Image: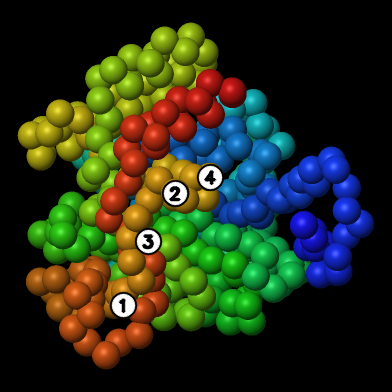
Amino acid sequence: MIIFSPITSQPLPWSPVPIIFFMPPQKIIIDTDPGQDDAIGILLALASPEELDLLGIVTVAGNVPLELTSRNALMLCELAKKPETKVFAGCSRPLVRPLVTAEHVHGKTGLDGADLPPPKISLQNQHGVDWTIETLLSAKDDSITICCFAPLTNVAMAMIKAPEILPKINRIVMMGGGYFEGGNITPTAEFNIYVDPHAANTVLRCGRPIAMMPLDVTHRALMQRKWLEELRNMGSPVGDAAYGMMSFYERFDVEKYGSNGGPLHDPTVIAYLLKPEFFKGRDVNVEIEIQSNLTLGMTVVDWWNVTDRKPNVTYFNKINSDGFFQLILDRLSLL
């Protein structure tokens, strides 16, 4: 057997000892609006340093206003005992529309259900969009993955201000949209897209690889009471906080849908980077409705390939939910 170097593509001397090549961790930026489900996604990333090199967290207005999403991100970094994590505040409102928030889901703080102390660490001074641009421009091509848990305002603004960042982006993995499941904030629109549909329209037209985790996949990942109890039984500050947040958070969707548990949205983004085999979908074209008052923010998904529009998104609709929830338990137990 001939073994080739992954660097030079030249044959390596034969050795009876197996040669193992270790992949460096993926460089990621998390763009987020915490949010209890954002919190689990952030904690999952912070608990996975061997696979993910988290360069920084950028907050945006969404689930709650920017002041609270930024505060929440700082508190989560302290909860995970990762105070060195850089957190930047981004945009305080969408590109065009007035801000719509979701306190009816997440509570007045965004992290209701967790009794976390005020953060001791502080935000970085630089605006999150400017930091994102600077970080991407200083990187190699195709080297940084942007993980989006929130309205896409910051990411779109970075692309508008500095389109030369696009070659630096390896891919965008985002939670947003819906097709088979419809919407969760209007009959046709998912919240992250609805808050800033113009930003979503910009990002989906950027030409870089995009993986989309829509309601069609997250509604297959329902929190069960046994799983919540396992969070509580961790006997750690992270487990206690996660249990409190999820217990508060799931009540809205249980009441709304009449299901046995609430969906866990944003952690699917990080889980996909860690365990892509847990997810199945297909490459399709997705467009964003930005003109109609009736269907504003709708993700128009050409699932059946009935147009001649080229695919611009890998759109997921299936998940190994048991593996997904076990991954979260396993990683959060490390914090």
Please tell me which residue lies in front, 38 or 114: 38
Residue 94: tell me if it is visible. no
- For disc 1, the marked residue is 285
Spatial distance from mark 3 to mark 2, Cα to Cα?
Answer: 15 Å
Task: First in sequence, mark 3 or 1: give its number.
Answer: 3
The quarter of the picture where residue 267 lies is: top left
Residue at image x 88%, y 60%? Answer: 12
Spatial distance from mark 3 to mark 1, Cα to Cα?
Answer: 11 Å
**Disc marking residue 274:** 4
- For disc 3, the marked residue is 212
Spatial distance from mark 4 to mark 3, Cα to Cα?
Answer: 15 Å
Residue at image x 60%, y 37%? Answer: 48
**Disc 2 vs disc 4: which is toward the camera?**
2
Q: Amino acid at mark 1?
A: Asn
Q: Residues within 10 Å of mark 2 (few under 14, many from 20)?
A: few
Residue at image x 20%, y 30%? Answer: 261
Q: Amino acid at mark 4?
A: Leu
Q: Residues within 10 Å of mark 1 (few under 14, many from 20)?
A: many
Q: Secondary structure at mark 2?
A: helix
For this view, does 122 lie left or right of residue 36? Answer: right
Task: First in sequence, mark 3 or 2: give its number.
Answer: 3
Spatial distance from mark 1 to mark 2, Cα to Cα?
Answer: 22 Å
Q: Amino acid at mark 3?
A: Met
Residue 52 lies, with reference to residue 116, above or below; the image says below
